Image (cartoon, rainbow, N blue to C red):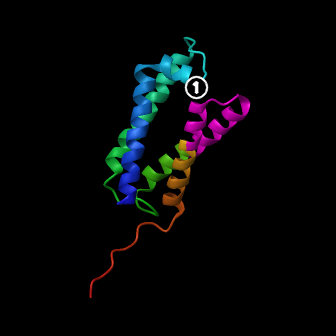
Amino acid sequence: MLVQRFMEITAIVLGAAALALIFAPEFALVRFAIEPVPTAIPLAELYGAALFGLAITSWIARTMLLGGIYGKAVVAGGFGHALVGVLALVHAVRASSGNAFLWGACVLYGLLAITFGMLMFGRGPAAPTASA
């Protein structure tokens, strides 16, 4: 049940970020203190499209058995995205003054990386107990 809620929340958060990047890339870039130059806007939209794909994957996988060897492709994709994302955001925070949106994204990606890491490298879902 906790894994299902985690995947639902992941899908909703990634989906909201994706829609903002797809339909209002200038607004999203300004929030992260990035100049919305004409070359950055298509990159933001492409990143939004990638987030949208991950959001759909998370939404569909919410009812699957995930963790350990189960749902390995979905969990590995989420873990890889979150780990690289948090490393890139930590680098961006260190290189800039770090506004609230940048710090928030860094914390969110950190939580995603930890949770997907626990799912990927943990023991997996518990077997149902047999009633005697």
Which quadrant would residue 131 be assigned to in this image?
Answer: bottom left
Residue 20's spot in the image, x, y percent?
Answer: 43, 26
When the figure is inspected, residue 127 is found, relative to residue 93, above or below; the finding is below
| In the depicted structure, whether residue 12 falls above or below residue 123 | above
Q: Is residue 98 left or right of residue 32?
A: right
Judged from this view, the residue extending furthest toward the top is: 38
The residue at 46%/23% (across/down) is 45
Give the structural element (helix, strand or loop) at label 1.
loop
| Rendered residue at 43%/19% (across/down) | 24
Identify the image quadrant of the N terminus: bottom left
x, y percent for residue 75? 46, 52
Point 54% across, 62% down: residue: 121
Give, as a single range, the part of the protein colored magenta.
83-107
Q: From the image, give the main secondary structure of the stretch colored magenta.
A: helix
Q: Which residue lies furthest to the left in this view?
A: 132
Q: Nearer the viewer, residue 118 or 46?
A: 118
Q: Point out residue 9 in the picture as x, y percentages from the top left corner.
A: 39, 46
Circle 1 Cα neighbour tier, 10 Å, few/some/many (<14 / 14–19 / ≥20): some
Indicate whether residue 64 is drawn in magenta: no
Q: Quadrant of the C terminus?
A: bottom left
Relative to 38, residue 58 above or below: below
According to the picture, the residue beneath numbered tag 1 turns out to be 32
Outermost residue toward the bottom in this view? 132
The amino acid marked with disc number 1 is Phe
